[in-house]
Image: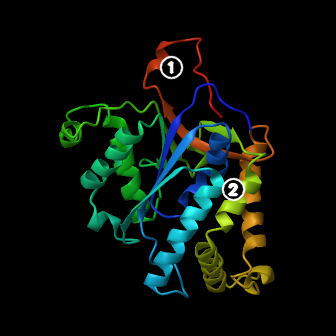
Amino acid sequence: MTESNNKKRIVVFAAHGDDLEFTCGGTIAKFTDRGHEVALVVATDNDKGSFELSADELRAARDAEIHRAAELLGIGTVICLGYSDGELREQCPVPELRGKFMRVIREFKADITFTWDPFAPYEGHPDHRTVSAAANEAASFSHFPLYHPEQIAEGLEPHYVAEQWYFAKSPRDQNKFVDITDYVEKKIEALCLHESQMVLTVRDLQFALQASGLDLPWLADLDPHDYRGAIDTQIRAVTAAVGRAHGYDYAEGFRRERHGPIPNLAKGQEAEEDV
């Protein structure tokens, strides 16, 4: 463990329980290992992602999985908002969700936020799009006292978020890369704690394989409950590809915005990196 002299407070805004582990699990493990404080906000109750469990069974399973994985990654605060999976934008439109996210930012005094990228093309999941828009607006305007003034009236202070990190699916958008070589095992372990989601992931791949008419015996014959090997292979391949391009064994890439226009104005100077 390497302690940082400049401790940061980080909030991850996710739509579903496994979003964090897939996109930034190694980076978050590295942050917490260096003594930074992390909170996770999960917007939905994850109640539709199964071919085996009922919605009630799935809610209970996913809630337990979220908390177990968060504990493994060193995340100290978990907030589950409980909206229905796939119905977030109808149940909590962006302006309302922005207020909830802004409240968390102001209460937690976040220095850094992580979320889906509101400007990324081809994002198919409506929950991801809703969370990304609300989190982007909340982080951008939480220091403006006239946004959600009812929170200010309650005693919460406006708070400036210095850095916004986005899960960048496309390499063209990535401008920040984190070496997770020492944390890839923990990323995989945390992901595999989301048992119900990993079973779904394998089963969904099998549906796609069947529809394609192509031949992958290792996938076609795989018991979805025996998912560890497939997930391990997938995560190592993805993070190794990012790492190779930037001199690391394993890495995660993000689109990061920090400190507004200041880096362009302060030529020849670089702000300290935390991970």
| Residue 96 in the image, given as x and y percentages of width and height | 25, 54
Closest to the observer, 53 or 87 = 53
| Colouring used for the render | rainbow
Q: Amino acid at mark 1?
A: Pro
| Residue 262 in the image, given as x and y percentages of width and height | 46, 19
Identify the residue under disc 2. 187
Q: In the displayed structure, does residue 227 sit left or right of residue 195?
A: right
- Residue 268 in view in this figure: yes
Mark 1: few, some, or many residues within 10 Å (few <14, many ≥20)?
few
Nearer mark to the viewer, of 1 and 2 = 2
Closest to the observer, 55 or 6 = 6
- Point out the image quarter for the C terminus: top right
Task: Name the residue: 54% across, 59% down.
Answer: 19
- Point out the image quarter for the N terminus: top right
Label 1 vs label 2: CA separation? 31 Å
Q: Dot 1: what SS?
A: helix
Task: Name the residue: 58% across, 26% down.
Answer: 6
